[in-house]
Image (cartoon, rainbow, N blue to C red):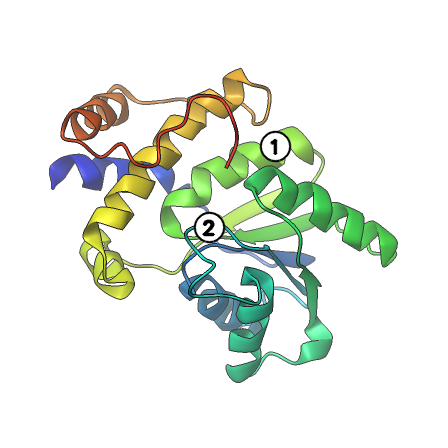
């Protein structure tokens, strides 16, 4: 639907790919994050990957041993050596993805100046805003597997789930900024109107009131 396409386009940062010190692969229900990370690694975009993520209600069935663990295994299947991967296995929200990744790298004596943040496509803007708040000195570029919305829905196999999560991530853009968890982001009138129409259409399962998820 047109409203979903508007939000899909809004959430992607459209950054030009470039080489960075590390990659940070954000755990989610989407194994395509790990596959895209492996693609970029093989292109020489970064020498080191941190996969970060424990489990969430939307991932526990698919990734019972944790998002980061399953992501790493998939990347290794695609040719990434295990020596190029670090695992952060405890993060349960996007803020923790960055705070715990930074703590892990500090512990390893690694202090990157730049990073490629790799996420599902509709998480790009929220990931960027969260990193700006938590790790503002890190120079970041956002990336996701290039897919159309229909192709992405087909890859996940659940249109209702994708649209509910797309609406939920939109709400989190301003909600988390208001709560101090993320840097403010502009919300276009088109995106705001599309969000309201989708909420009115009943895509409300991922809406929250106060607590980050």
Q: Front-most of 135 and 96?
A: 96
In the image, which disc is placed on residue 16?
2
User: Which residue is painted at 52% across and 21% down in the image?
Assistant: 177
Q: Front-most of 16 and 87?
A: 87
Tell me: residue 79, above or below residue 172: below
Give the image quarter of residue 172. Answer: top left
Residue 186 in sight in this render: yes
The reply to whether callout 1 and callout 2 are in contact (CB within 8 Å) is no
Which residue in the rendered view is the most extreme toward the top?
Answer: 178
Q: Quadrant of the N terminus?
A: top left
Please provide percent x and percent y for residue 203: 22, 35
Please tell me how crowded label 2 is: few (under 14), some (14-19), or many (20+) other residues with Cα within 10 Å. Answer: few
In the image, which disc is placed on residue 9?
none
Please provide percent x and percent y for residue 47: 68, 68
The alpha-carbon separation of the residues under discs 1 and 2 comes to: 18 Å
Q: Is residue 209 left or right of residue 154?
A: right
- Which mark lies nearer to you, 1 or 2? 1
User: Which residue is painted at 59% across and 26% down in the image?
Assistant: 181
Give the image quarter of residue 72. Answer: bottom right
In the image, which disc is placed on residue 132?
1
Q: How many marks?
A: 2
User: Which residue is painted at 22% across and 24% down in the image?
Assistant: 190
Please provide percent x and percent y for residue 25: 56, 57
Tell me: residue 182, above or below residue 42: above
Please provide percent x and percent y for residue 86: 71, 65
User: Which residue is painted at 21% across and 27% down in the image?
Assistant: 199
Which element type, helix, strand or loop, lies under badge 1? helix
Please tell me how crowded label 1 is: few (under 14), some (14-19), or many (20+) other residues with Cα within 10 Å. Answer: some
Residue 9 in sight in this render: no
Q: Front-most of 159 and 8?
A: 159
Which element type, helix, strand or loop, lies under badge 2? loop
């Amino acid at each position: 639907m047109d409203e979903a396409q508007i939000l899909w386009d809004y959430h992607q940062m459209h950054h030009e790919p470039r080489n960075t010190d590390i990659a940070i692969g954000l755990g989610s229900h989407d194994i395509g994050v790990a596959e895209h990370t492996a693609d970029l690694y093989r292109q020489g975009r970064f020498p080191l990957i941190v996969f970060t993520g424990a489990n969430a209600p939307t991932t526990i069935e698919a990734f019972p041993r944790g998002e980061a663990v399953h992501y790493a295994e998939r990347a290794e299947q695609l040719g990434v050596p295990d020596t190029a991967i670090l695992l952060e296995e405890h993060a349960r929200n996007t803020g923790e993805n960055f705070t715990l990744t930074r703590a892990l790298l500090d512990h390893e004596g690694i202090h990157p100046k730049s990073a490629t943040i790799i996420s599902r496509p509709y998480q790009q803007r929220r990931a960027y805003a969260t990193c700006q708040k938590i790790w503002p000195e890190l120079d970041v570029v956002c990336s996701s597997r290039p897919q159309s919305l229909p192709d992405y829905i087909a890859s996940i196999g659940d249109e209702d789930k994708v649209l509910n999560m797309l609406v939920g991530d939109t709400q989190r853009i301003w909600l988390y900024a208001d709560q101090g968890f993320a840097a403010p982001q502009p919300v276009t009138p088109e995106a705001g109107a599309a969000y309201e129409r989708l909420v009115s259409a009943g895509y409300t399962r991922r809406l929250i009131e106060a607590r980050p998820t």
